[in-house]
Image: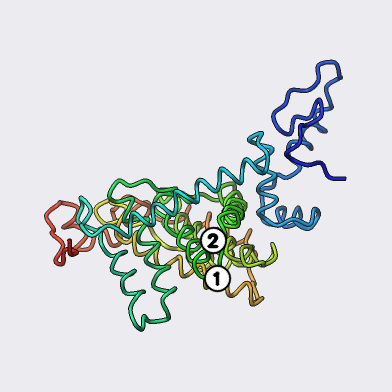
């Protein structure tokens, strides 16, 4: 019978950080390692094997892995993640209130414009499409004006996962607890990316930031919609493979252009990847191999295209004007 993870562990159980019973001989090193790492994994293949072996979702495996590492119960972890989701919702709400420009003049007010458009009579592709984009914009605009955000997995990609989950909450009735579980699905996928590639734009370009966030969001959407672990992994693969090669070329060195619009656009991209996976569209390249490609492309990408603002959009005539602080936006958002 499986032990309740929230129950008091027996003497010598170190899975929650409890010291072994000193009256008992220490277990062999190998056995201790097996206890501590029973839900650990390095690759998507290993993660999916754990899901199949224990009949668990990706979120369940990620939760148990975190419980082992942090010495917390599953309930404590879910409650903690619910708090993070609450902060994500707050950052969206704050971003939608912004009407003035950021200190750089590069962003501000567009999330509110998109939201108003979504509430109009006939928004293109329906209201949820524009609202998802608005929510992705909102988080990055909140960040640009020194608001609080939750890096998911980075500040520059922090709008994608919240935009997707908030859309599911409004359109599909996703509860706060279900959103917390979906975030653990994202965590489960993020662990693999972190171990085998990176999240840093300075190391891997924007593909490592926005690509990783979209990958995590797509998997989270699938499990939140009742999809299988394999479908979630496929969604992550679809999302990530179609961001490979995306460079990090922020104008003026600010996390605003093109970062703000990318968060809105790639939130929608995450839904597209989830739809493909839920439809069981053929996923030719498994997630592990896409992550290997992410790492390889990031390694080969010139440093000028990795967050240095020394190439791409940052060195266009417009980009150079912002670099020197001489450019004023032609259309200030209304106050």
Q: Which residue is at a point 40% across and 62% down the rendered structure image?
A: 136
Q: Position of residue 26 (x, y in %)?
A: 83, 22
Alpha carbon of mark 2 to alpha carbon of mark 1: how far?
A: 8 Å
Q: Position of residue 83 (x, y in %)?
A: 51, 45
Q: Is 9 left, or right, of 217 in this rendering?
A: right
- Check disc 2 and report its element: helix, strand or loop: helix
Provide the residue designation for mark 1.
273
Viewport quadrant of the C terminus: bottom left
Provide the residue designation for mark 2.
215
Q: Position of residue 285 (x, y in %)?
A: 63, 68
> Quick one: 233 or 224, which is closer to the camera?
224
Q: Residue furthest top?
A: 23
Relative height, residue 82 to residue 233 (above, below) = above
> Quick one: 72 or 155, which is closer to the camera?
72
Relative height, residue 234 to residue 22 (above, below) = below
Q: Which residue is at a point 34% across and 82% down the rendered structure image?
A: 121
> Quick one: 300 or 235, which is closer to the camera?
235
Badge 2 vs badge 1, beta-carbon distance below 8 Å: yes
Mark closest to the chain's N terminus, 2 or 1: 2
**Total count of labels:** 2
């Amino acid at each position: 019978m499986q032990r309740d993870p929230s129950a008091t562990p027996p003497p010598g159980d170190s899975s929650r950080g409890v010291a072994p019973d000193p009256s008992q001989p220490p277990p062999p090193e190998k056995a201790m390692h097996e206890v501590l790492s029973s839900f650990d994994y390095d690759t998507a293949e290993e993660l999916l094997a754990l899901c199949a072996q224990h009949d668990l979702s990706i979120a369940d495996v990620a939760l148990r892995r975190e419980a082992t590492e942090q010495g917390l119960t599953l309930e404590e972890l879910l409650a903690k993640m619910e708090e993070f989701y609450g902060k994500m919702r707050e950052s969206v709400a704050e971003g939608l209130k912004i009407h003035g420009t950021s200190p750089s003049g590069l962003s501000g007010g567009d999330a509110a414009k998109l939201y108003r458009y979504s509430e109009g009579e006939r928004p293109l592709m329906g209201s949820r499409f524009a609202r998802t984009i608005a929510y992705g914009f909102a988080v990055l605009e909140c960040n640009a004006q020194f608001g609080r955000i939750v890096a998911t997995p980075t500040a520059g990609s922090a709008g994608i996962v919240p935009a997707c989950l908030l859309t599911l909450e409004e359109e599909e009735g996703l509860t706060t607890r279900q959103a917390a579980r979906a975030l653990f699905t994202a965590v489960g996928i993020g662990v693999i990316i972190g171990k085998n590639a990176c999240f840093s734009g300075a190391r891997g370009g924007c593909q490592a930031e926005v690509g990783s966030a979209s990958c995590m969001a797509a998997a989270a959407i699938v499990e939140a919609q009742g999809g299988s672990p394999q479908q979630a992994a496929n969604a992550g693969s679809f999302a990530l493979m179609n961001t490979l090669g995306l460079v990090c070329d922020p104008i003026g060195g600010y996390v605003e252009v093109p970062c703000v619009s990318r968060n809105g656009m790639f939130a929608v991209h995450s839904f597209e990847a989830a739809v493909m996976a839920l439809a069981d569209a053929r996923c030719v390249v498994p997630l592990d191999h896409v992550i290997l490609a992410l790492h390889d492309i990031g390694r080969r990408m010139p440093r000028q295209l990795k967050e240095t603002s020394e190439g791409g959009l940052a060195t266009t005539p417009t980009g150079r004007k912002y670099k020197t602080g001489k450019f004023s936006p032609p259309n200030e958002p209304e106050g």
